[in-house]
Image (spheres, rainbow, N blue to C red):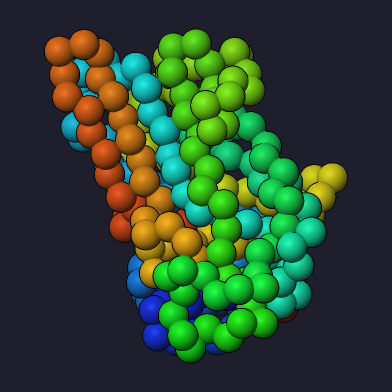
Amino acid sequence: PTCGMVNEETYIESCDDIKSFYSPGRSAAQLIWFQRGFVEYRFPNHFISGKNPNYVSFSLEICSEAPGYRNVWPSDITFSINDRELLTYTSPGDFGGRHGKLTPIWWTDGNTQFGLLKTISVDGSGTYLDGVMKSEEINIDTLALSAQPYISFKIEIKKDAKHVGGINIFGKSYGDYPQNIVMHVEYCKGHPSYSETSHGSKKHKVEQASHK
């Protein structure tokens, strides 16, 4: 299998080795890529105890994963919150051809450089991608955000997807957008909003990925 992670200065452990995804160094990852499988990010939810959330969103910079880069390279990326599958987004390509605005100089131009900023959100009416409703079946109540000791956000490339084109997930030091994965939660009227950046635990199941 071929897959990998990098921090701001170098590769984390060995490239093209699934074992790298279990390294303690993974917490410093600023760019990860794989062809199929999933990563799960676990966010704190202590701040919603006794409150009534009416909105949750996750925003992140992503693109497909091809050998080197290919601007036309579709990939079906599925998102879930608390093990409830929300939607599948078809990424149009693995983007390069210019250096990412934030990508370190050492990361060569022949590699993936930047992605697109996507926002997955859920409120009382349904599920949205970049503000466009995709489903009314799952709403904020369906997710039961307080039911377990964390909020799970899973990003997956299914092995039976129509386009198994992999994924790149960018942190704040790569790509075009200076952010990690950001969770935003709003409470019912009278309570403040809350946002949390991902630095927590990650669970990985990574399978084959195209060479970087």
Measuring 44% from the left and 12% from the top, which residue is drawn there? Answer: 124
Could you say which is closer to the camera, residue 25 or residue 198?
198
Q: Is residue 39 visible?
A: no
Could you say which is closer to the camera, residue 66 or residue 204?
66
- Image coordinates of residue 94 in percent, x first then y, are 69, 63
**Relative to 120, residue 18 above or below:** below
Could you say which is closer to the camera, residue 175 or residue 202?
175
**Relative to 143, residue 63 above or below:** below
From the viewer's perspective, tell me whether residue 36 is left or right of residue 60.
Answer: right
- Image coordinates of residue 29 in percent, x first then y, are 42, 70
Measuring 63% from the left and 23% from the top, which residue is drawn there? Answer: 134
Q: Quadrant of the C terminus?
A: bottom right
Q: Is residue 192 visible?
A: yes
Q: Quadrant of the N terminus?
A: bottom right
**Relative to 140, residue 5 above or below:** below
- Image coordinates of residue 182 in percent, x first then y, are 36, 46
**Relative to 150, residue 40 above or below:** below
From the viewer's perspective, tell me whether residue 60 is left or right of residue 51.
Answer: right
